[in-house]
Image (cartoon, rainbow, N blue to C red):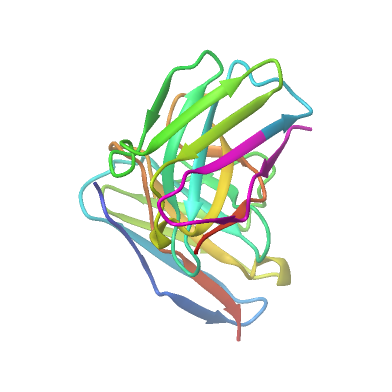
Amino acid sequence: EIVMTQSPATLSVSPGERATLSCRASQSVRTNLVWYQQKPGQAPRLLILGASTRATGISARFSGSGSGTEFTLTISSLQSEDFAVYYCQQYDNWPCSFGQGTKLEIK
Amino acid sequence: QVQLQESGPGLVKPSETLSLTCTVSGGSISPYYWTWIRQPPGKGLEWVAYISYSGNSNSNPSLESRVTISVDTSKNQISLKLSSVTAADTAVYYCARKTPTGALYFDLWGHGTLVTVSS
């Protein structure tokens, strides 16, 4: 199984600033990677698919990049509703696997 | 708008079988695949199993000897059974829809239900 490693575990950023979250795969997943956002008590929400394509209805403040083993989720000009936990997930290799998550908190 | 609602006992005894149901409302089960994903307290997500509206299924190799997944199209429900549970199976269990593209990621999730394994 491919191991997905996210860093940092917790990221403290001030509203209005930019946040950069990282996800690393233990072997290449090409661009078969998605990002989810999860707020407390809520279901995860699909943000990015194919490493860089925003899902339907997702703000342009969210952008994804990377391929192979290194991926980045960037959130520009953080809004209060963006503070949440973010997970990456690969679907290139069976079975699919998730990262442990990055908690984005208000600084 | 399609919504998913998980239901089932919140407490299961060790060695017994965990049974959960996901009810799909606001839309049809077909032609999609439906999955179960779990999240132990304070930990990350783990895909458990999926099933199509027609009954094609697959499960995580780490769990497949204990997993039974089924679909009832007449009730718009997907069910999960996990046998011989231990404390390690304590988790929030989510029902989710697999994207129609065929790739194994998930575009719609339920709110999840917490299952605790304890005597």
- Residue B37 at x, y = what percent? 49, 45
Q: Horizontally, is A47 left or right of B87 in the view?
A: right
Q: Residue at x 65, y 39 (%)?
A: A56
In the image shown, does B14 or A93 lie closer to the viewer?
A: B14
Q: Residue at x 57, y 80 (%)?
A: A13
Q: Is residue A56 above or below residue A107?
A: above
Q: Residue at x 57, y 47 (%)?
A: B94
When asked about the image quadrant of residue A104, the answer is bottom right
| Residue B15 lies in the magenta stretch | yes
- Residue A38 at x, y = what percent? 60, 59
Q: Farthest bottom residue? A: A107
Quadrant of the snapshot with the N terminus of chain B: top right
- Residue A16 at x, y = what percent? 66, 76
In the image shown, does B48 or A80 lie closer to the viewer?
A: B48
Residue A75 seen anywhere in this rendered image of the structure: no
Q: Is residue A60 above or below residue B61?
A: below
Q: Which residues are magenta?
A: B1-22
Q: Residue at x 61, y 67 (%)?
A: A84
Residue B59 seen anywhere in this rendered image of the structure: yes
Q: Is residue A21 above or below residue B31?
A: below
In the image shown, does B16 or A13 lie closer to the viewer?
A: B16
